[in-house]
Image: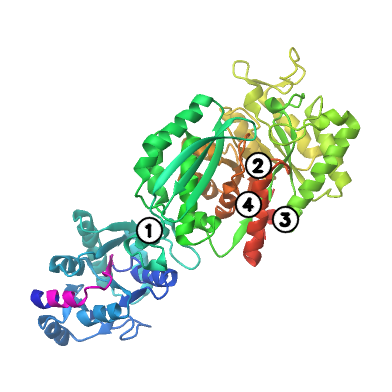
Amino acid sequence: CIGLIRRFCLLMSGQPPPLVICGPSGVGKSVLIKHLCKVFPDKFGFSVSHTTRGPRPGEEDGVHYHFADLETMKKDVEAGKFIESAMVHGNMYGTSKEAVDSVGRAGKICILDIDVQGAQNIRASGCFEQVRFVFLYPPSMQELERRLRGRGTETEEKVLRRLAGAQREMDFAKSVAFFDHTFVLDGLSGGNVPPSVHEFCAMLRAWYPTLGGLGDVGVIRSVRAREIIDSCGHRALEVDLCTSERVFRAAVPGCAEASSALDAVEAINSAVGPRLIGMDAARQAEIDRLLTEAQLSASACMAVSMAVCRAGAAISDVPLYEHIARLAGQRTDSYTMPVPALNVIDGGNWAGNRLGCRELLILPIGAGSFKEAMAMGAEVYHTLKGVIRKRYGQDACNVGDRGGFAPTVHDNDEALEVLMQAIQKSGHAGKVKLSANIGAPEFYNAESRLYDLDFKNAGSSAETKNAEQLMSLYNQWFEKYPFGSIEDPFDHDDWEAQSKFVSRVGQDRQIVGGDSLLGDPSRMQKAVEVKACNALLLKASQIGSVTKAIEASCMAQRAGWSVVVSHHSGETEDTFLADLAVGLHTGHIRAGAPCRSEWLSKYNELIRIEEELGSMASFARASSP
């Protein structure tokens, strides 16, 4: 019999080797195969197996299985007409030579949906030198049992037999080394495609160059870093990642010290880059783990990770935001355009006035689209410039690090009044809410446990408050002004004050954890447990990789939080944040003032994305605070 099989394999020479997919009954092999045929139309052929079990409702002979009687199938197996066969759950299953040959003759890659015994037989036969073996695991035995019972076609005895068989198959898969890839299949249905399936599709492209004609476009050929300058005049980092066909570039701020920038460039060019050469750029999570292990700075890791992500999108031939959505397991049939949080007045240590909080921002939630929101924001911004010029003079129209104006106000209320006057004068009253990045750690004294909002006025103690008094001040603002969001209202470790504040006002507005969390999983978990905030500021350049950004965003969303994708105080013209906000379905983005190219590059890219998506895009105003 083995001799007949080997002769058959000689006939298969010149045809692509089969893809063997194994997994317990109920794991979802058929669903995965259907998805593969959708992603790679006309590239795969489904080898129809033979079985002696009876057809289930909806199954057709020759389509789902070739249904045969046990005696006939045994004779064909003995005659060498099958390349593999096995008894499973009391029924015989097998793959005929003709079934595989017919797929190969059509110039397609043959998918073999078989059990582990059949896979072992194919491997032992030596039929195909490059055959690929894949094993699928269920999320849990409990979920597998739920699926099996949900069929409504199995007796209790058969369900128990299948569950026992599933455990044996999984134990077998873990005990052998011939499976080229194994993964948990969970959540593949409708418009939802989990990251594990996207990674598997990318792997298939590497195994079978004929898929999509992409060849080795995703193989990394070189990685080169260089020092550039960001919007604050600080040293920043830019990375070029080259594949066989294209160059993918990414830039991040955050290297204020010359030594740190040069160290990052040297580490990437001499150590990390060479390790990435030859790797598949579609393997985002794997590459990000390598970057983390290399102990680069967060900004250096992120620059490489962003370039890899852009290459991954090109490999999949999809827009960057869609690729990110796939990696995150988000929907790809519709998207949410974020509400822009536009910085308009700078304060704190970022400006020379006496405004205690770092920045005041506007949220144009009354717009009908992102494009309209940006138009409203720009109109308020320019109206504010006129109000400031008239009240404080031309010199007061200078801007801070993030593009906001820095008028010579004497306290926070004065700045809020000036801003409200501009909103009303622009004609957008009722359509724009306010947001404040307080940056409370800047004016918190850990020894006295007091906050000094007038910390920039040496010797003054007029604005010194304890946590309870500071809460009262915020409440006065909320009663007087249309606040929708407030960030870092207390010190990073003042958990008690943060929890009290959320319990009192968190139902009506966002309480954002920014520098107090920095996307750190342990701090985020504590914040969830003590209910210290209800929104996460996702500052990509500080978090370290695309994978970590996705994990932080998903963790926040699972907790019921909002997510605000954010820029850095210094910025580059890189537009990655725009795609990140859309791909992660965050609904919020803070990318600076509506001026200067380093800020507008992100906002303008969002306008282009919204135009490209058309009816698939909806503005997030309905979910805004």
Q: CA distance from mark 4 to mark 3?
A: 14 Å
Start and end of the magenta stretch? 6-24
Report if residue 625 lies within the magenta region. Answer: no
Q: Is residue 212 above or below residue 397?
A: below
| Local secondary structure at mark 2 | helix
Give yes or no for contact between labels 4 and 3 (Cβ–Cβ under 8 Å). Answer: no
Residue drawn at x 48%, y 50% as measured from the top left? 247
Circle number at residue 216: 1
In the picture as drawn, the residue positioned furthest to the right comes out as 390
**Front label number (3 vs 2):** 2
Residue 527 in view here: no
Instruction: Categorize mark 4 by other alpha carbons within 10 Å: few (<14), some (14-19), many (20+).
Output: many
**Front label number (4 vs 1):** 1
Give yes or no for contact between labels 3 and 2 (Cβ–Cβ under 8 Å). Answer: no
**Image quadrant in which you'd find residue 453:** top right
* Between discs 4 and 1, the one toward the N terminus: 1
Residue sitting nearer the eye, 395 or 321: 395
* Between discs 1 and 3, the one toward the N terminus: 1
Circle number at residue 587: 4
Q: CA distance from mark 2 to mark 4?
A: 21 Å
| Local secondary structure at mark 1 | loop
Give yes or no for contact between labels 1 and 3 (Cβ–Cβ under 8 Å). Answer: no
Q: Which residue is mark 2?
A: 598
Scheme of colours in the image: rainbow
Q: CA distance from mark 4 to mark 1?
A: 36 Å
- In which quadrant is the N terminus drawn? bottom left
Give yes or no for contact between labels 4 and 1 (Cβ–Cβ under 8 Å). Answer: no
Q: Which residue is mark 3?
A: 371
* Between discs 4 and 3, the one toward the N terminus: 3
Q: Amino acid at mark 3?
A: Lys
Circle number at residue 379: none
Q: Amino acid at mark 4?
A: Gly
